[in-house]
Image: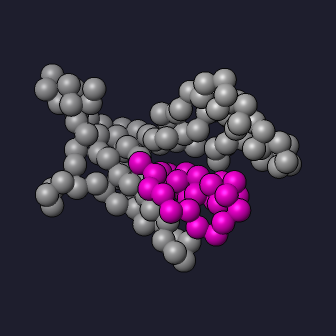
Amino acid sequence: MVDYALTLLPDHTLDEQIRLSLRDFPEEHQNINQTPFPPVKFRPISVNIEAKAPGSGKNDLMVQLSIWVAAQFKKLEMLRGAKSVDIGLPMISIEGHDWKAHMAYQVQDGSIDLRERTHRKHLLRVGDIQTVLGAACNG
């Protein structure tokens, strides 16, 4: 499981639609996300966030995000009844003070393409918490 997630808080109508769309699935699959964790069971996860201490390894961080987003794609496939899902899933990795944006896409063969978001060939840094200006970029 990732450390944090930004979720959609459905209004009453959308909440009812989510619950109705899940009622025909077995009880263990009656959740909108890849986890049955009660606080997010019916609140769609829109952004996955993984945080690691400085120096703990970018590979571990990206492996965790990759596994989590692969499970999210599988859940979306199950809900749609389709082999692949044509959508990008945003993610944020935090290692120490550095925040980076990523996007995951599902390729036609079902594999996952995970990319660091870039702007004009430079890594898109969401911000950092080392300076007041860097922290302001996070908001």
Residue 90 or residue 11, whichever sits in front: 11
Q: Position of residue 21 (x, y in %)?
A: 75, 44
Left or right, residue 82 beside residue 20: left
Q: Residue furthest front?
A: 13
The quarter of the picture where the N terminus appears is top right
Q: How is the image coloured?
A: one colour
Numbered label tally: 0
- Decide if residue 4 is in sight here: no
Q: Which residues are magenta?
A: 63-90
Residue at the spot x=50%, y=62% of the render? 86
Residue at the spot x=48%, y=57% of the render? 87
Residue 23 or residue 102, whichever sits in front: 23
Residue at the spot x=48%, y=33% of the render? 6
Left or right, residue 65 beside residue 41: left
Q: Quadrant of residue 82 in the image?
A: bottom right
Q: Position of residue 30 (x, y in %)?
A: 78, 42
Q: Position of residue 95 (x, y in %)?
A: 32, 42
Image vertical order of residue 12 relative to residue 31, above or below: above
Residue 80 or residue 136, whichever sits in front: 80
- Secondary structure of the magenta portion, mostly? helix
Q: Quadrant of residue 114 in the image?
A: bottom left
Q: Position of residue 3 (x, y in %)?
A: 50, 36
